[in-house]
Image: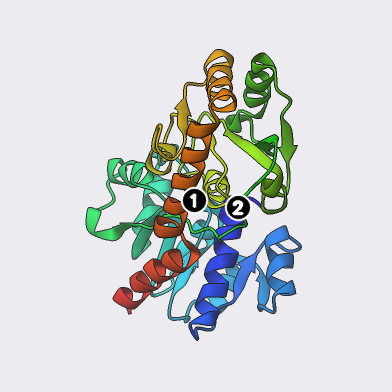
Amino acid sequence: MRGGQWQVLRLMEGLRDRGHDNLLLSRKGSPLALQAQSRGFETHELTLLSVARWSRAHITHAHDARSHAAAALASPARLVVSRRVAFPVQVNPLSRWKYRRAAHYIAVSHFVERVLLDAGIAASKITVVYDGVPALPVSNGSEILVPQSQDPAKGTELALEGARLAGFPARISGNLEKDLTHARLFLYITHSEGLGSAALLAMAAGVPVIASNVGGLREIVEHECTGLLTENTPEAIAAAIRRLTSDCTLAGSLGAQARLAAGQKFSVDRMVDDTLRIYEALL
């Protein structure tokens, strides 16, 4: 389960809480499908036929490239597409055709919104909806955490190298909601990022975040207010770590301000309500 999958699950739960029926089409046996099934949601394997079968739903919402392509082919009446990635839209004829099929786009950040605008999507068809994260217990730990990822663009090794250079051990976490209770700092180092929901999760736990100065991360981590932004070099990362480990007052202030921002701007309820308003406008 990566950030995008958690957002789908939280959106489904929020819609259900507000009285809306929704079902999930996803890769068979995927972690998202298993999580949804365990929480009582109807799930089906994502195929062109399954999308076509449910194309009469009031809203069809595609959350990744594969589901976007399947939905574009099935031509549902009201297709909403979420775009979370920061890389440019491809310019080949098939991609242009696919991107003309959606009724509306949800961009996970203003950075991603600009990517869509550069691809020729009309501004009237794009709405920015930030990710939502749950309120977590305030951390009171001593560990430096790095999120687990096999994506080479995420910079895991660079984060670990920066921590080693600073003289501190860092731990890779595959269960952030659990491990953040033991965290002192959170390193989110990446070469490309649409937003960074893992950084938001750390902020919700009041953990000071050191994040790469790239993409949508600049919209959630306000430098020297809700965290520190760093260049992607071991030396810069190490300097940021040393600064926060030696200045407990600054680290505490960043963590408190980050937790406040997460509750006010990046809550699950806000994400669900903003998405629901888009659905209602299309209906």
Residue 79: in sight, yes or no?
no
> Counting other residues with Cα less than 10 Å from the Cα at mark 2, is it few (<14), some (14-19), or many (20 or more)?
some
Residue 249: in sight, yes or no?
yes
Question: Which residue is located at x 55 percent, y 60 percent?
Answer: 135
Q: Which mark is residue 138?
A: 2
Residues at circles 1 and 2 in contact by the CB criterion of under 8 Å: yes
Q: Position of residue 157 (x, y in %)?
A: 67, 24
* Along the viewing direction, whichever of 90 and 164 lies nearer the viewer: 164
> Counting other residues with Cα less than 10 Å from the Cα at mark 1, is it few (<14), some (14-19), or many (20 or more)?
many
Residue placed farthest to the bottom in the image?
19
Q: Earlier in the sequence, mark 1 or mark 2?
A: 2
Question: Which residue is located at x 72 percent, y 59 percent?
Answer: 30
Q: Point out the image quarter for the C terminus.
A: bottom left
Task: Tell me which colouring the rendered structure shows.
Answer: rainbow
User: Residue 16: which quarter of the image?
Assistant: bottom right
> Which amino acid lies under the numbered mark 2 shown in the image of this protein?
Val
Q: Position of residue 150 (x, y in %)?
A: 69, 36
- Local SS, label 1: helix
Q: Which mark is residue 195?
A: none
Residue 107, compared with residue 144, is above or below; it is below
What distance separates the C-alpha of mark 1 from that of mark 2?
9 Å
Direction from residue 169 to residue 233 in the image, left or right: left
User: Residue 208: which quarter of the image?
Assistant: top right
- Local SS, label 2: loop
Q: Which mark is residue 259?
A: 1
Q: Position of residue 166 (x, y in %)?
A: 64, 17
Residue 25, compared with residue 214, is above or below; it is below
Question: Which residue is located at x 42 percent, y 47 percent?
Answer: 95
User: Residue 183: which quarter of the image?
Assistant: top right
Q: Position of residue 10 (x, y in %)?
A: 56, 66
